[in-house]
Image (spheres, grey):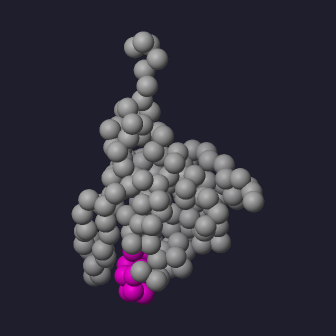
Amino acid sequence: MSRVSLRPYLPSDAARCATIFRASIEELASEDYSADQCAAWAASADDEIAFAKRLSGALTLVALFEGDVAGFASLKAANAIDMLYVDPACARRGVATSLLDALVKLATARGAKDVTSDVSDTARPLFERLGFRADRRNLVELGHEWLANTTMTKRLAAPSNPSAH
């Protein structure tokens, strides 16, 4: 099994990330959301300039699997995971776990007491496996469709301060 490596998002990654975003929704979320819901959700990347601006406006990481961009995730502010998407061809190979682990570590390093995310029904089992707990269900309107998600939170351990000893 190949290892996943991470690097910072670059503006040149925008088109590939938009492709991953759409494919992830259309292929991986189709069991949890209707075709119309998936289409409305995937359309969020149709304006690639706005999509790229969203990625560069957060701390976004790109995952490489066997040398190719296989996924991305972003952290807004100190503790809000905004996006986590994986190319369906690389699903279940540790890409999403690596990205999520890295964002949790970055949030911890930034002094966050917890990390939150509005998580799709498709991604919820991954977040639960990594220690996130459901806080509330939400309905979000995209286009003319309503999509359900769950706000999930993971409490973080306080970073150790070696100079305090």
Q: Please name the residue shown 33% across and 53% down the image.
A: 153
Question: Any magenta on residue 34?
Answer: yes
Q: Position of residue 17 (x, y in %)?
A: 55, 62
Question: Residue at point 52% right, 45% down?
Answer: 102
Q: Quadrant of the C terminus?
A: top left
Which residue occupies the foreground of this view, 140 or 129?
A: 129
Residue at the image point whose x is 61% and y is 45% from the top: 7
Q: Quadrant of the N terminus?
A: bottom right
User: Is residue 77 visible from the viewing direction of this image?
Assistant: no
Q: Measured from the top left, where is residue 43 in percent x and y? A: 42, 74
Q: Is residue 96 left or right of residue 148?
A: right
From what the image shows, is residue 94 above or below residue 40? Answer: above
| Residue 71 horizontal side relative to residue 82, left or right | right
Marks counted in the figure total 0
The stretch in magenta equals 33-43
Where is residue 47? Give x, y as percent.
43, 67
| Observer-nearest of 71 and 55 | 71
Query: In which image quadrant can residue 50 be found?
Result: bottom left
Whether 42 is among the magenta residues is yes
Q: Residue furthest bottom?
A: 35
Pick the residue in front: 54 or 27. Answer: 27
Residue 5 is at least partly visible in this image: yes
Magenta-colored segment: predominant secondary structure: helix
